[in-house]
Image (cartoon, coloured by chain):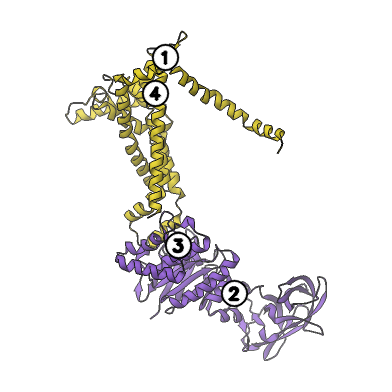
């Protein structure tokens, strides 16, 4: 049986549509990330699932039961809010017990669940503190604990790491991954950080412009982006896109604006007519000593430690991002040879749809 | 740090300190000195030590006025707090209707006490008042609110509540708007009923506001004066004479400035004590809930 199922969910604020016909099925115990920029509709979708907002049309089913007509508290869903939303006048223990008391869970059962969750999250010493007496990271754990004790069928995490500093965010990300193994429920996390989505999710749902753009496991999203938006949003720095025309071949050989050609692994017959673009990730473009695929003039050099990113412009002015090794001697203004790895190149049609090589 | 710099700092606060000393500290000390003298408005007085205080403690009219003051304060403050809270709760929405009603309920607060008492005299007068007319319409005998010793304090309390409800309502509205929306969303996901949400989320979040309202109103109502002077002049037979009305009558009716000052100092001490007691009690309550 599916865990969560969305069927044709629509939502508009007045005349402004925010979600267009969203359908989706979650597997049991699956960890899903809604990934998208601000205003893509991902938070609205999360709030509709939670029951904090209502959909204009469509149905929501959770483990075989229709829930879109139930109040939030009766949906077997727990949510961790972006700003935690802990009750400031209650201790940690009372915060965690509140929902269970309302659901008339017996006293000893409440105590047991709180003790278990506190042990898992290592917050046992904090149980009698108030939220104001804790750090951001501790509050986050309490917020997660408050969700855990409810033993819901679905966890919703709204930007769970966005309020933590960089070091804590990394640690919490690892802990969330470990926590995922322990809970017997599906999880949906909303995030605009692709690294969070890539590392935590079983499947990523990329959202933009009110619609689901692509659904798939992280590496599929990364290696076979469905369209230009997904290609550019996932991966850092973003994929370079270069206008090109077909120059024959069974696997399409594409001619770039500066006259150089890229041998892709995309079957030529699959490509549509019209303006095409070649998409290459920085790791598929390397700075070489001898003659490469093409040449570029260096605009900017970023030294990341383990590798160097080189931002260059081709002869026709198209920007391209390339990689070089850690101790690259490339300087701004240099003319460098660039080798484009055709096997890893993607082709995008006039409507933005992505086409990928068999080997990619 | 040089001495010169210290002086510059003092220059900055000097205007405030000067004004504060002139219009607050000096009168306070002067009042204290007056209370130790027997003095009238026209001649030099003479020092009597605690004579005025001694006389006050044996003055049944002063004692009765204190009792009246406490009674009317007890009638006003709890009811006013609850009514202001209920108004704030029902008007805490973004709609235009709510905004209009907020304005209307606050409007009474900008009226002067003279107008308020005029309005309520029309309401309460048994022969010509609105309430009298309603009573008569039911075929009952009109109730003489302002001339019945048992009804005059409740009438004063109702007038005062109507007049003063706007500001506490505003404080509660401000307090309500401080409660983050996601707390209510968390409560909704925690399956809390409306009732539970009110008692466990809204009310505890308004704790500080409630304490503020109660303390401000207690201090204000212990000084109730205008309504009692204008509506009833303290009558019938002193049943609505408040402490401030008593000291007003002493000072500007009988010209006993020293005696009135002593009464004022005593009232000051009483208000201070009551307020500090409230502060201390609520502080202790919050400590207790801390350790829960």
- In the picture, the disc for residue B114 is 4
Number of the front mark, 3 or 2 = 3
Q: Is residue B148 above or below residue A98?
A: above
Number of the front mark, 2 or 1 = 1
Q: Earlier in the sequence, mark 3 or mark 2?
A: 3
Q: Mark 3 — on which chain does it sit?
A: A
SS state under label 1:
loop
**Which residue is at 39% across, 68% downward?**
A115
- Residue A290 point in image, percent of width and height: 82, 85
Number of the front mark, 1 or 4 = 1
Number of the front mark, 3 or 4 = 3
Q: Mark 1 — on which chain does it sit?
A: B
Mark 1 and mark 4: Cα distance apart in space: 38 Å
Chain A: its colour in the image is purple
- In the picture, the disc for residue A126 is 3
Give neighbour class at mark 2: few <14, some 14-19, many 20+ (Cα, 10 Å): many
Mark 3 and mark 4: Cα distance apart in space: 57 Å
Q: Nearer the viewer, residue A132 or A268?
A: A132
Chain shaded yellow? B
**Which residue is at 16% across, 29% downward?**
B139
- Residue B39 point in image, percent of width and height: 43, 12
SS state under label 4:
helix
Q: Are marks 3 and 4 on the same chain?
A: no
Residue bearing mark 1:
B48
Mark 3 and mark 2: Cα distance apart in space: 42 Å
Q: Are marks 3 and 2 on the same chain?
A: yes
On the rendered structure, is A359 left or right of B230?
right
Residue bearing mark 2:
A230
SS state under label 2:
helix
Residue B283 falls in image quadrant = top left
- Residue B262 point in image, percent of width and height: 40, 20
Q: Quadrant of the N terminus of chain A?
A: bottom left
């Amino acid at each position: 049986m599916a865990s969560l199922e969305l069927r044709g969910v629509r939502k508009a604020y007045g005349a402004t549509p925010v979600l267009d016909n969203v359908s989706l099925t979650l597997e049991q115990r699956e960890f899903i990330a809604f990934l998208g920029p601000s205003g893509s509709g991902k938070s609205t979708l999360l709030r509709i699932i939670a029951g904090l907002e209502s959909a204009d049309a469509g149905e929501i089913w959770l483990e075989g039961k229709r829930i879109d007509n139930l109040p939030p508290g009766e949906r077997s869903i727990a949510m961790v809010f972006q700003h935690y939303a802990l009750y400031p006048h209650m201790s940690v223990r009372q915060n965690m017990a509140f929902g269970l008391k309302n659901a008339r869970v017996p006293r000893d059962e409440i105590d047991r669940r709180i003790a278990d969750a506190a042990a898992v999250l290592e917050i046992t010493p904090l149980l009698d503190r108030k939220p104001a007496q804790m750090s951001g990271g501790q509050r986050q754990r309490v917020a997660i604990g408050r969700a855990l004790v409810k033993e819901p069928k679905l966890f919703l995490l709204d930007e769970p790491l966005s309020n933590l500093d960089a070091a804590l965010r990394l640690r919490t990300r690892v802990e969330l991954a470990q926590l995922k193994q322990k809970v017997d429920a599906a999880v949906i996390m909303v995030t605009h950080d692709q690294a969070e989505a890539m590392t935590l999710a079983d499947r990523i749902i990329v959202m933009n412009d009110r619609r689901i753009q692509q659904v798939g496991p992280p590496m599929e999203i990364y290696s076979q982006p469905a369209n230009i938006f997904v290609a550019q949003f996932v991966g850092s720095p973003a994929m370079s896109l270069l206008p090109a025309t077909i120059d024959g071949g069974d696997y399409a050989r594409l001619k770039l604006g500066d006259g150089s050609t890229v041998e892709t692994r995309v079957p030529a017959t699959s490509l549509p007519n019209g303006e095409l673009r070649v998409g290459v990730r920085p790791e598929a473009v390397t700075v070489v000593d001898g003659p490469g695929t093409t040449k570029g003039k260096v605009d900017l050099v970023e030294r990341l430690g383990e590798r160097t990113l080189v931002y260059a412009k081709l002869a026709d002015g198209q920007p391209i991002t390339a990689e070089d090794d850690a101790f690259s001697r490339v300087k701004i203004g240099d003319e460098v040879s660039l080798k484009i790895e055709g096997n890893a190149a993607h082709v995008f049609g006039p409507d933005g749809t992505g086409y990928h090589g068999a080997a990619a | 740090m040089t001495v010169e710099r210290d002086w510059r700092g003092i220059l900055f606060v000097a205007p405030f300190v000067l004004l504060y000393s002139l219009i607050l500290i000096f009168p306070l000390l002067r009042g204290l000195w007056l209370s130790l003298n027997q003095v009238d408005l026209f001649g030099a007085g003479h020092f009597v030590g605690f004579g005025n205080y001694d006389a006050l403690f044996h003055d049944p009219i002063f004692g009765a006025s204190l009792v009246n003051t406490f009674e009317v304060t007890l009638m006003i403050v709890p009811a006013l707090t609850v009514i202001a809270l209920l108004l704030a709760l029902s008007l805490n929405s973004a709609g235009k209707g709510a905004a209009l009603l907020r304005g209307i309920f606050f409007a009474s607060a900008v009226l002067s006490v003279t107008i308020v008492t005029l309005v309520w005299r029309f309401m309460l007068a048994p022969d010509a008042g609105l309430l009298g007319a309603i009573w008569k319409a039911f075929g009952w005998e009109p109730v003489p609110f302002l001339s019945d010793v048992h009804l005059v304090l409740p009438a004063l309390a109702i007038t005062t509540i109507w007049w003063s409800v706007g500001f506490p309502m505003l404080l509660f509205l401000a307090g309500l708007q401080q409660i983050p929306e996601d707390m209510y969303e968390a409560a909704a996901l925690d399956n809390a009923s409306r009732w539970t949400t009110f008692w466990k989320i809204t009310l505890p979040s308004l704790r500080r506001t409630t304490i503020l309202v109660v303390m401000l109103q207690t201090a204000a109502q212990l000084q109730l004066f205008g309504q009692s002077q204008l509506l009833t002049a303290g009558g019938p037979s002193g049943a609505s004479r408040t402490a401030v009305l008593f000291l007003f009558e002493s000072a500007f009716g009988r010209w006993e400035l020293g005696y009135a000052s002593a009464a004022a100092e005593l009232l000051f001490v009483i208000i201070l004590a009551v307020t500090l007691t409230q502060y201390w009690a609520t502080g202790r309550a919050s400590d207790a809930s801390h350790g829960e």
